[in-house]
């Protein structure tokens, strides 16, 4: 699959709670590629939860570390990479992953995102008094960007549709 589209990796982007980690794991199992979640990778390297990094060092520090690890991971060969939701905000991150990977957007409906995020405590950007309003604001603010940067977009979070689109768009 990955060889067919001429790139080494499959990279998933999309909003927090869009299903990147869940779909990514399944995609990896199916293709035989190694699965790496960029947020889990960053937490392991930094020895801290993302919420702790935001609280102790701020978002700017987090974004710099995120860029460094994305560039490192983009050098790999044969991985399914689930990005953090804000990774595509920096053009240099997008360029790095697209050099070696097909960038797939999980364009998940808002109600599903809210459902997926309902028990999340490790998303500092959404820790606001009105979580739903803040999530909606950020979702709308980023929607166009996600579509602009991705090579392909998948409307449903169903694995079969992701595979179908990846195969069709090679
Ligand atoms: C963020 C998304 C998170 C995590 C951090 C910031 C964002 O990743 O990287 O909390 O700016 O959208 P997930 O999309 O995996 O939750």
Image (cartoon, grey):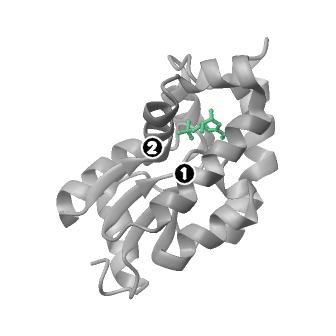
Q: Earlier in the sequence, mark 2 or mark 1?
A: 2
Which class describes the residues within 10 Å of circle 2: few (<14), some (14-19), or many (20+)? many
Residue labelled 2 has its Cβ within 8 Å of some atom of ligand 1: no
Q: Residue at x 40, y 87 (%)?
A: 170
Residue topped by disc 2: 19
Which class describes the residues within 10 Å of circle 1: few (<14), some (14-19), or many (20+)? some
Query: Are the two marked residues, 2 and 1, in contact with CB atoms closer than 8 angstroms?
Result: no
Q: Residue at x 54, y 51 (%)?
A: 69
In the shown orientation, is residue 49 left or right of residue 127?
A: left
- Quarter of the render that holds ligand 1: top right
In the shown orientation, is residue 159 left or right of residue 38?
A: left
Where does residue 33 sit, x and y in percent of width and height?
Answer: 24, 63
Going by the picture, which residue comes out furthest to the top?
129
Residue topped by disc 1: 69
| Of residues 18 and 48, the one drawn nearer to the viewer in this rendering | 48
| Of residues 21 and 167, the one drawn nearer to the viewer in this rendering | 21
- Specify the quadrant that holds the N terminus: bottom left
Q: Is residue 40 above or below residue 9?
A: above
Q: CA distance from mark 2 to mark 1?
A: 21 Å
Q: Is residue 9 visible?
A: yes
Q: Residue at x 47, y 36 (%)?
A: 45
Q: Is residue 88 above or below residue 86?
A: below
Task: Count numbered badges in the picture.
Answer: 2
Q: Is residue 108 above or below residue 17?
A: below
Where does residue 104 sit, x and y in percent of width and height?
Answer: 50, 66
Q: Nearer the viewer, mark 2 or mark 1?
A: 1
Q: Residue at x 50, y 39 (%)?
A: 42
Q: Is residue 161 visible?
A: no
- Secondary element type, mark 2: loop
């Amino acid at each position: 699959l990955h060889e067919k589209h001429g790139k080494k990796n499959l990279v998933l982007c999309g909003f927090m709670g869009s299903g990147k980690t869940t779909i990514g794991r399944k995609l990896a199992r199916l293709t035989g590629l190694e699965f790496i979640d960029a947020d889990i990778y960053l937490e392991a390297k930094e020895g801290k939860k993302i919420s702790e990094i935001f609280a102790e060092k701020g978002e700017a520090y987090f974004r710099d570390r995120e860029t460094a690890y994305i560039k490192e991971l983009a050098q790999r060969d044969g991985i399914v990479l689930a990005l953090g939701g804000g990774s595509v905000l920096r053009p240099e991150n997008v360029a790095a992953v697209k050099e070696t990977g097909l960038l797939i957007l999980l364009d998940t409906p808002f109600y599903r995102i809210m459902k997926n995020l309902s028990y999340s405590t490790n998303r500092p950007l959404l820790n606001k008094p009105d979580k739903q309003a803040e999530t909606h604001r950020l979702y709308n603010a980023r929607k166009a960007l996600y579509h602009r940067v991705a090579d392909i977009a998948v409307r449903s979070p169903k694995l079969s549709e992701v595979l179908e689109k990846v195969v069709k768009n090679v």
